[in-house]
Image: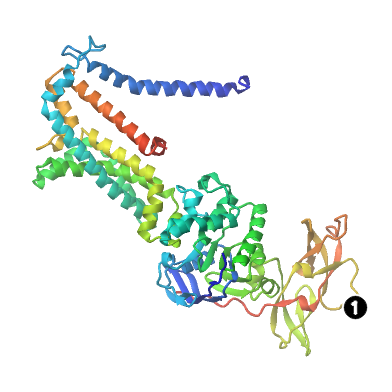
Amino acid sequence: MRKKKRSGNHLHTFFWATGGLVVVGMFLPLLVVFLISFNPGNELVFPPRGISLRWYLNIFRHPVFLTSFQFSVILGALTTLTSLAIGLSGALVLTRRKFRGAQTISAFFLSPLVVPQVVLGMGFLSLFSMLRVYHSIPSLFILHLIITLPYTLRVLIANLSRCPISTEEAAMVLGAGKYRAFAEITLPMIKPGIVASAIFAFVTSFDNFTASQFLIWDRTTLPIEIYAYITKENDPTVAAVSSLLILMTMGLVIVMERWVGLETVTG
Amino acid sequence: MTYARAKRVVLENVSVNYGKVLALNDISLEIMPGELISLLGPSGCGKTTLLRAIAGFAPLNTGEIFIGEAACTDLPPSKRNIGMVFQDYALFPHMTVDKNIEFGLRMRGIPPVERHPAVRRILNMLNLDGLEERYPRQLSGGQQQRVALARALVVEPEVLLLDEPLAALDKKLREEMQIELRSLQKRIGITTIFVTHDQEEALTLSDRVVVLERGRIIQVGRPNEIYEHPQTQFSALFIGKSNFIQGEVISCQPEESVCQVLGIGRVAVKRVAQMGAKLRFVLRPEKVGLSRERPIHIEKNCACGRIENVVYLGMVTEYHVRIDQGFRLVVTLLNTNRTGQGFEVGETVWANWSPEDLIHIPADEPPLKDL
């Protein structure tokens, strides 16, 4: 049996090899960062020359890490919720109402994807300066909204266009009002898309550095604080911060897996 | 489940337009309680729009729709108490069969203790026992179709709307479902409106057929009336095969007129008409006989031609007979002899028919009213 499928076997090996390389390429750096964070000395060396939690304790001696982490989480959550709300209403209009210019509008909303982040950041800096808005909260919120909207919109449009209007109509014929039909039928059908775009939006907002650095007035985000730290110091504290973030992300993934089933998010 | 509450459905001067396109043009129709009526026509004729108008998904420009005694023109779909089966079934993919069927009852605020027996009854009625916990994607096409039907019927609607519900099934299953659907409908006696583009299906299933073209009703009638007495060329063309014969009246007698038809010669028709009037007729292919010899005692209503094409269809054979001057007659003959052999291509034959079988087409389609 097996000998007959020789070419199939070659392909099989090829896929396993590439798959393996991708996994190794993704996890090796994470592993390195994780191990470096346990260095007892104050230099970033690999492999670590011992095991110490010194740099983890050091995080707490720098309250900026905590405050910026808090700010990043709040900003990310706020951005995600707003981006989802706007993205969902936008996707609904663009998929359910056939009107002239729908394509143009959808292209317009996807356009921030192709604008370099530096340009975006610079643009917002000049704009907010002109408006005399020197506060990080509104300006970063708006910036992150603009950056995340293409993702949420795109994912939700894809999901909604695979979900025929007739199911919602069937619910209406069966006695559900317009909003109830949407909540009971369409919303559960696009749940994977909503979860996926929420993760996208949150991660994009939480990780953003390039454009965000232009709008740091009274608050800073965690990536910018990490960057500021390594320009001044050269010890494994940032590795410890990163390790904590990795653990947090893994925890989140496990929760998602339990809660919605990850295959619905990635599929 | 008994249906003491089959309702009459009345459409009065219903018009619907999409932008500048008039999708339904002044439709008036009365559907009797318990009747199964089918809306038949080619795609774009407005049959689906008409169904959606009754469901409340296509807002009317003008006109009224009554279900029972009450006007429901301004009611949203959720308040019309109708059952509807969509072409793609529109089952809820994230719900089990049970939950799908229960949905309408839940929306009506019926408590679970009453919902469960109702769901069980309808599952049993449609031979769906044992599938309660399945998801729609785990069902075959026929089963999905039944679930859609069960979901529509469990709420005991006043009228059942079916939008080409059998179109997605293969031929064999479709024919089975046609019979099943028909007997189910008769058993519960619910007023049913059925959209189809399949003329055979319409003739098989319906009490009456409504033929639609470009947003207008062309003809309404029982299946045999529609077939035997098409009112327009469109009806005749769309339902079954037809030969069209056009002639000028050259003599009138009290009982019949004689027409001169190009290519065929003199044709007697059971119709009184004025001299010189132009008449048009439909001649169904199965009403024409063929013979090798010139039929005796028949002068009119026969024509000599050459067989141009033979199409063997199993039960019948279709012959294309070229009469003089380009006129071609389609003739179908039942294959009653065991060899299945009939006339050959190139043979000279005589076609004949009786005057009663020439169906007069009263009028052309009335001119279309534009917006």
> Looking at the picture, does residue A210 appear above or below residue B49?
above
Front position in the image: A219 or A174: A174
Residue drawn at point x = 10 percent, y = 48 percent: A131
**Can residue B266 be seen from the camera position used here?**
no
Q: Position of residue B358 (x, y in %)?
A: 75, 76
**Can residue A95 be seen from the camera position used here?**
yes
Residue drawn at point x = 9 percent, y = 42 percent: A134
Say which chain tag 1 marks: B
Asked which quadrant contains residue B210, the reply is bottom right
Asked which quadrant contains residue B17, the reply is bottom left
Residue drawn at point x = 31 percent, y = 38 percent: A199
Decide: few, some or many residues near mark 1? Use Cα within 10 Å; few <14, some 14-19, many ≥20. Answer: few
Q: Position of residue B306 (x, y in %)?
A: 83, 63
Q: Given the image, on which type of amino acid does mark 1 rest?
A: His
Front position in the image: B67 or B199: B67
> Looking at the picture, does residue A116 appear above or below residue B239?
above
Instruction: Report which residue position mark 1 lands on.
Output: B297
Residue drawn at point x = 28 percent, y = 49 percent: A85
The quarter of the picture where the C terminus of chain A appears is top left
Front position in the image: B254 or A163: A163
Q: Is residue A122 left or right of residue A159?
A: left
Q: Is residue B142 left or right of residue B313?
A: left
Q: Where is residue A102 in the image (x, y as percent from the top left)?
A: 35, 54
